[in-house]
Amino acid sequence: MSENILVISTSPRRGGNSETLADAFIRGAKEAGHQTEKICLYDKTIGFCKGCLACLQSHCCVIHDDADVIAQKMRKADVLVFATPIYYYEMCGQMKTMLDRANPLYDSDYQFRDIYLLASAAETEESAMDGAIKGISGWIDCFPNSRLSGTVLAGVQKPLAQYREIRHYKRLMKWGKQFKGGICRSVDSSPYFFY
């Protein structure tokens, strides 16, 4: 069954390690016949949520920028994949801002069920990703039909593109290929770390 997968690369930098993770996932998903779309936030205009809650009535944001368009794409996706660098043991600010701006999806007819978090950090401690997992889990809790289906942390200090031939990069591509009815069977809710 072909899935509609939306990958959101949230890094403020083009071609960074988290985007490299996203590209590996996309490559595997495409090889398996899934429909994929990648959105990079580094070239988008996304303002902060104003907390007006008008979106709860209209399911659209009153701020007309790229975040409103992205949120509507999120609503229609079967699978959401977020790729983020870890900054100060948390997701990057661009990702948090996008999650806040996705408030129009709350209590809507969203399609996504499976959500994946791909992260890169400059250290190899497993706890480096805990804040990002907690942050996205809080957002996911507001969407009772969805779940955090898998996480990846790449703890590297060099450009990840140098590691394209290592087995872990290949494993991430496999994850993109292994969707069966929306669930990547080899992924669970515990982080998968590689260095």
Image: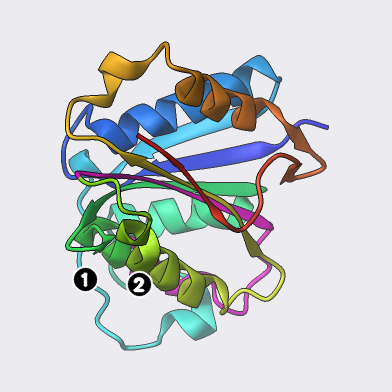
Q: Position of residue 175 (x, y in %)?
A: 62, 32
| Residue at the outermost bottom position | 52
> Quadrant where the N terminus lies?
top right
Q: Report the coloring of the rendering.
A: rainbow
The front one of 97 and 52 is 97
Please say if 38 is above or below 125: above
- The amino acid pointed to by label 2 is Asp
> Quadrant where the C terminus lies?
top left
The front one of 152 and 114 is 152
**Residue at x-position 35% and y-position 72%:** 100
Q: Which mark is residue 48?
A: 1
Give SS at disc 2.
helix
**Residue at x-position 57% and y-position 78%:** 141
Residue 46: in sight, yes or no?
no
**Mark nearer the N terminus (1 vs 2):** 1
Instruction: Using the rendered view, name the quadrant where residue 15 is placed.
Output: top left
Answer left or right for 136 relative to 141: left
* Residue 86 counted in the magenta span: no
**Contact (CB < 8 A) between labels 1 and 2?**
yes
* Residue 117 counted in the magenta span: yes
Q: Position of residue 120 (x, y in %)?
A: 30, 43
* Residues drawn in magenta: 98-122
